[in-house]
Amino acid sequence: MNISTAVAYRILELCEENNLTVNKLSTLSGVTQSTVNDIVNHKAKNIGIITIKKLCDGFGITISDFFETEHFRNLEQEMY
């Protein structure tokens, strides 16, 4: 799994846990719905930390909470 896929899975997981739609998350976080859709649909490859921080604010969690999951523990090394 690569980082963008892990981020997408984590966002969807948190939406489900918090009973939020992508649209509601967009409203709560101040990130456009098209950006969140691109992330969760694996169209965004370079997701900025500022965007992730805004999404975390929308979920009411810290960045540490966001990344402290199995999704991020065994990521592949990415070569560009």
Image (cartoon, rainbow, N blue to C red):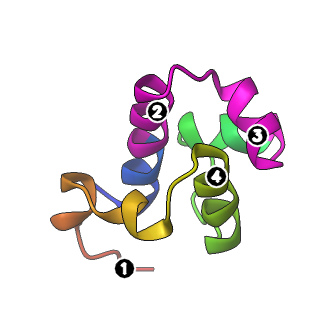
Q: Secondary structure at mark 3?
A: helix
For marks 4 and 2, the one nearer the N-term is 2
Report the magenta residues as a range: 9-34
Q: Label 2 vs label 3: CA separation?
A: 15 Å
**Residue 24 image point, x, y percent:** 73, 26
**Residue 76 image point, x, y percent:** 22, 68
Q: Secondary structure at mark 4?
A: helix
Left or right: where does residue 7 sit relative to residue 21? left
Residue 47 appearing in the image:
no
Which residue is found at the position 56% from the left and 34% from the top? 41
For marks 4 and 1, the one nearer the N-term is 4
Look at the picture and state if 74 lies above or below 40.
below
Look at the picture and state if 34 lies above or below 68.
above
Q: Where is mark 3, residue-wise? A: 28
Q: Where is mark 1, residue-wise? A: 79
Splitting the image into 4 quarters, where does residue 16 fall?
A: top left
Q: Label 4 vs label 2: CA separation?
A: 11 Å
Residue at the outermost front position: 60
Q: Where is mark 4, residue-wise? A: 55
Q: Label 3 vs label 4: CA separation?
A: 8 Å
Look at the picture and state if 26 lies above or below 72.
above
- Name the residue type under label 3: Leu
Q: Label 2 vs label 1: CA separation?
A: 26 Å
Foreground label between 4 and 1: 4
For marks 3 and 4, the one nearer the N-term is 3
- Name the residue type under label 2: Leu
**Residue 22 image point, x, y percent:** 66, 27
Q: Secondary structure at mark 1?
A: loop
Q: Where is mark 2, residue-wise? A: 12
Left or right: where does residue 23 sit relative to residue 63? right
Give 74 or 45, whichever is nearer the viewer: 74
